[in-house]
Amino acid sequence: MIKIKPILRFFSLVAFVVSLSCSGGQKKTEQTSTSVNETTPKVEINTEAKLLLKTLNEMGDYANSRDFPSLIKPSSVYEELDGNILILDLRSESAFDDGHIKGAVRVDFSDLPAYFTNDIKPFEYDKIVLACYAGQIASYAASLLRLAGYGNVYAMRWGMSGWNQHFAEDSWLANVSSDFQDQLETEDHDKAPLTDFPQLNTGLSSGDEILQQRIDSLFAAGYSDALIHADDVFEDPEHYYTINYDRRDKYESGHIPGAIRYKPGGTLGIVSEMQTIPVDKEVVLYCNTGHNSGFATAYLRLFGYDAKTLTFGNNAFMYDKMKEEESSLSWLPFTEAEIHDYPYVQD
């Protein structure tokens, strides 16, 4: 069981206040502006959701801070290998034995809470870096750990695919695709009507207890249900409530049929925005790479939404378009330029 750290709450809150003062409060202003019509009747949210929101805000509102998402480049990890960092590899035993970063420790996703509580003193490290195959699993796990109060946890961008060509062949390089880019649309879609948050039904009476229970249950459930592939979404797009979690210009350039744009930094924790996400439908989030949406998916699943992150993001279905528009729209297509030749060890 992961224990929420009270001391980290204090430092997280201080960091959040400093962040606002440095930005002149601009980010907060953006968050409070929503697309919901002011005349729309308000819908009260359930008690457990309120308690969970209150606790997360008291801890520093990580989801709307400058640290969200908490990603670190492979090059930065390599430069800090001799420093005070811990690398946790979330891949299978066979993948780990085939090659891993020197000094890395293999930990199963579902065992992370026990590992943080019983096997290490997390705050003795400057950074704890999670590495997986492509970065999406690590992003999901890092988000949950950050929400639990571990403010020194990072997900390695691109996963082990960015570390060495050896790992990229069967991961990122094998999954970039342009198969569905001819099915993209540019029509703007409205958000769903306001509704209550999901009913968590934990039976607990404090936000701390609810947060603890939700995080423990999500780790115990594993990560498979938090991931979805482009093939499934394009096969039946109407089945899903698809969230384009990116800039407006990228959304307008072409998006998954039926997708609705939600603004990064102006959705998570914003009651009137989250209330437009249906509780009775599978929710798919996607971004450039699947990293940002992985972090956002963890937040929504914490509140009980049936949310899934689209693995490899736009790279999985409109890769050629991303490369063509890379300079004009700042897309992030995965290319061999992202792959380093860093050493690895085998067991």
Image: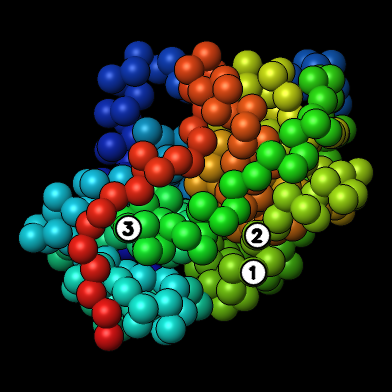
Q: Can I make out residue 70 in this image?
A: no
> Within 10 angstroms of label 3, few (less than 14), some, or many (20 or more) residues?
many
Residue 181's place in the image compared with 107, above or below, is: above
Amino acid under disc 2: Leu
Q: Can I make out residue 310 in this image?
A: yes
Residue 10's place in the image compared with 31, above or below, is: below
Amino acid under disc 3: Asn
Residue sitting farthest toward the left: 82
Percent across and percent down for residue 66 are: 37, 33
Res 227 label: 2
Measure the C-alpha gap from mark 3 to mark 1.
25 Å
Percent across and percent down for residue 148 are: 43, 60
> Within 10 angstroms of label 1, few (less than 14), some, or many (20 or more) residues?
few
Measure the C-alpha gap from mark 1 to mark 2.
6 Å
Res 164 label: 3
Measure the C-alpha gap from mark 2 to mark 3.
24 Å
Q: Earlier in the sequence, mark 2 or mark 3?
A: 3
Q: Nearer the viewer, mark 2 or mark 3?
A: 3
Residue indicated by mark 1? 224
| Label 2: element kind | strand
Res 54 label: none
Residue in the foreground of this view, choosing between 20 and 88: 88
Residue in the foreground of this view, choosing between 80 and 320: 320
Q: Residue at x 60, y 58 (%)?
A: 302
Does residue 159 appear to the left or right of 281 in the view shown?
left
Q: Are dots 1 and 2 in contact, CB under 8 Å?
A: yes
